[in-house]
């Protein structure tokens, strides 16, 4: 493959403290970078840029690592417009609305599910997202959950088995029996298509004992745990995530001091999902508490048809800065390097020599404009594995 040098970047966020200004963002001003064989070969000042086969003049734009969206639910059919409208008219959000999507998803063909997923991934890419995790969870039978993961795996290697989203309608009122299905036959069918195992630990979904059993069984099959934890109320989800060494505890909206300490001690990432609170009029998690305690924080969209139907990481960055106590620098790091940490990936989320050449060019002189100009389409170009796709 030919080498490419991108020059005249007003600012380049590398997320490598060894570069540039020495901050966590590793910010280089008047910068350039070289792409070779799908990876970053060099980064530094434009005045020192080496020769390359192809040259792209950024003409004063900023470059950041491609966003890493480490939490989404994209294998679904239909929408929940009526539910959203009712919620915005005063009805509280509960986990029960998931059943609406389950019905529509079961009725959809493989081709329809795949096309819908691909459309959302294109939408994400156009907004600077280069890596996406997505889950099952809208099938809730062995056959349907395995089908969802097969469809998802055609589009991304970052797939999560979420048979424990809610109790399947065929088992309503008997969560223990459904847990037995999830940890046995369903896990057996789904594990070959998944990298992670997840459970919604919440009132109306799965209690602590059921969640622990599901994640432990997934670990025994080689899957990495992550947890929908403490979204709607205080509960054991965060503690279970820390106890089992989960890659992430996601939501963390209601967290005690002990929960925050457990995350800090375990290294489990707190993945915060501001689109969900925005779309449900719920209280936002206090990111400042986690950051000040030394917890690694990721930001993600939680893109799903019920509680957070946004595919925009720039939107989530802006909301996190405005509503969750994050600085623009912290929010960008969490939406890139933080997301990579939540996926246990060290090849993405940064732009240093050897990393994958996933980068987003902004039609702005600084990443701060993501929060400074919320809702403005700032993405001017996206490269994934060294190939420009937007």
Image (cartoon, helix red, strand yellow):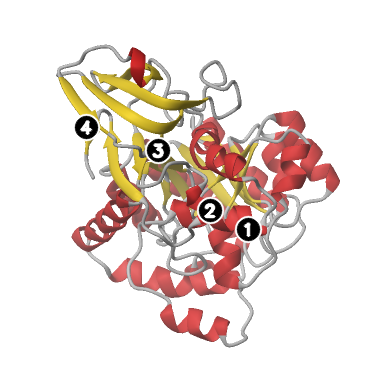
Determine which quarter of the picture holds residue 63.
Answer: top left
Q: Residue at x 49, y 29 (%)?
A: 222
Q: CA distance from mark 3 to mark 4?
A: 18 Å
- What whole-number distance in Å separates the C-alpha atoms at marks 1 and 4? 33 Å
Asked if the residue at tag 1 contacts the one at tag 2, i.e. Cβ–Cβ closer than 8 Å, the answer is yes
Tell which circle, 2 or 3, labels the residue nearer the N-terminal end.
3
Left or right: 374 as drawn, with respect to 173: left
Q: Residues within 10 Å of mark 1 (few under 14, many from 20)?
A: some
Give residue 32's mark. Answer: none
Residue 387, numbered label: 4
> Which residue: 37% across, 56% down?
74
Q: Residues within 10 Å of mark 3 (few under 14, many from 20)?
A: many
Mark 3 secondary-structure assignment: strand
Find residue 322 and name its label.
1
Dot 2 alpha-carbon crowd within 10 angstroms: few under 14, some 14 to 19, many 20 or more? many
Q: Nearer the viewer, residue 275 or 203?
A: 275
| Residue 129 in picture, x, y percent from top left | 37, 45
Pick the residue in front: 383 or 214.
383
Q: Nearer the viewer, mark 3 or mark 4?
A: 3
- The answer to whether residue 225 is above or below residue 112 is above
Lower sequence index among marks 2 and 1: 1
Q: Check the picture and name the quadrant holding the N terminus.
A: top left
Please give the residue where the numbered disc 2 appears in the rendered image. Answer: 371
**Residue 175 in sight in this render:** yes
Residue located farthest toward the right when viewing the structure as drawn: 257
**Element at label 1:** helix
Give the mark count: 4
């Amino acid at each position: 493959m030919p080498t490419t040098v991108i020059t005249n970047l007003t600012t380049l966020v590398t997320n490598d403290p060894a570069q540039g200004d020495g901050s966590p963002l590793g910010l280089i001003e008047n910068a350039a970078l070289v792409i070779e064989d799908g990876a970053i070969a060099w980064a530094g000042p434009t005045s020192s840029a080496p020769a390359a086969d192809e040259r792209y003049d950024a003409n004063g734009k900023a470059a950041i690592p491609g966003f890493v969206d480490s939490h989404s639910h994209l294998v679904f059919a239909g929408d929940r417009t009526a539910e959203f409208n009712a919620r915005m008219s005063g009805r509280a959000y509960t986990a029960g609305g998931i059943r609406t999507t389950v019905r529509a998803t079961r009725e959809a063909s493989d081709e329809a599910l795949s096309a819908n997923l691909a459309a959302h991934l294109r939408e994400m890419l156009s907004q600077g997202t280069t890596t996406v995790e997505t889950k099952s969870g809208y099938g809730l039978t062995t056959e349907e959950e395995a089908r969802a993961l097969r469809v998802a795996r055609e589009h991304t290697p970052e797939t999560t088995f979420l048979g424990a989203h809610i109790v399947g309608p065929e088992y309503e009122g008997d969560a223990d029996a459904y847990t037995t299905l999830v940890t046995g036959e369903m896990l057996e069918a789904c594990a070959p298509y998944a990298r992670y195992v997840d459970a919604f630990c919440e009132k109306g979904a799965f209690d602590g004992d059921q969640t622990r059993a599901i994640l432990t069984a997934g670990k025994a099959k080689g899957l990495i745990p992550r947890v929908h934890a403490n979204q709607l109320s205080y509960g054991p989800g965060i503690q279970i995530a820390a106890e089992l060494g989960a890659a992430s505890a996601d939501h963390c909206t209601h967290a005690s001091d002990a929960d925050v300490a457990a995350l800090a001690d375990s290294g489990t990432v707190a993945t915060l999902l501001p689109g969900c609170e925005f779309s449900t009029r719920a209280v936002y998690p206090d990111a400042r508490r986690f950051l000040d305690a030394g917890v690694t924080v990721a930001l993600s969209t939680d893109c799903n048809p019920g509680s957070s139907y946004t595919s925009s990481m720039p939107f989530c960055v802006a909301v996190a800065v405005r509503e969750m106590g994050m600085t623009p620098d912290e929010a960008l790091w969490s939406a890139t390097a933080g997301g990579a940490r939540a996926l246990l990936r060290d090849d993405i989320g940064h732009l240093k020599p050897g990393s994958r050449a996933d980068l987003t060019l902004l039609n702005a002189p600084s990443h701060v404009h993501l929060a400074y100009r919320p809702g403005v389409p700032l993405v001017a170009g996206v490269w994934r594995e060294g190939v420009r796709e937007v």
